[in-house]
Amino acid sequence: MALYWEWKDKVGEAVFLNMQTNKEYTISLYKGNAFLIFINEYKETDENGEEHNMYNLFSFFCDEEHGKRCLGLVKNTDNMFNDEYCRLTKIRINKDKYPYTKKLVSMLIKAFDEITIELFKEG
């Protein structure tokens, strides 16, 4: 099954910290045919000086169980969002657009000792 999302279905953002470089980066969050889809969106300038919107898939949670495994909440799994290259420090979720807000917040609280969780409501 192919992963898909609609650009209009952005549900929030996640801020990560690379502990080796001490640099933060922001990843867009989308709903689609998965529990949560993480997309790195950026702009790139071509050789003619024209700017283009670009993106690449950062990660995704296929379903709730897959999300729990990715967050290290299942026995014999590690939290892939809490290491020296990729530490999730903050997440912003539009609770009106994201149907799994309660489940995701519960998972994040269990997976992290320190994290900022911001919920907002925006049509």
Image (tube, rainbow, N blue to C red):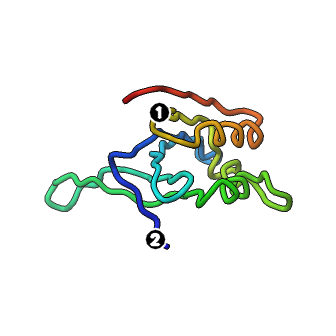
Task: Please give left or right for residue 60 compared with residue 31 in the image.
Answer: right
Q: Above or below — where is 66 with respect to 84?
A: below
Which is nearer the eye, 98 or 90?
98
- Residue 44: where, in percent of width, then height? 29, 54
Q: Above or below — where is 116 with respect to 74?
A: above
Task: Please give left or right for residue 11 compared with residue 52 in the image.
Answer: right
Count numbered badges in the picture: 2
Task: Please give left or right for residue 35 compared with residue 12 in the image.
Answer: right
Amino acid type at image mark 2:
Ala
> For residue 122, which quarter of the picture?
top left
- Measure the C-alpha gap from mark 2 to mark 1: 26 Å
- Residue 26: where, in percent of width, then height? 48, 42
Rendered image: mark on residue 9: none
Residue at the image point whose x is 45% and y is 41% from the top: 11
Task: Please give left or right for residue 98 compared with residue 67 in the image.
Answer: left
Rendered image: mark on residue 2: 2
* Secondary element at image label 1: loop
Residue at the image point whose x is 67% and y is 33% from the top: 115
Where does label 1 land, which residue? 96
- Residue 28: where, in percent of width, then height? 45, 45
Of label 2 and label 1, which has the lower sequence position?
Answer: 2
> For residue 103, which quarter of the picture?
top right
Residue at the image point whose x is 51% and y is 57% from the top: 58
Residue at the image point whose x is 34% and y is 50% from the top: 7
Amino acid type at image mark 1:
Asp
Q: Above or below — where is 88 with respect to 51?
A: above
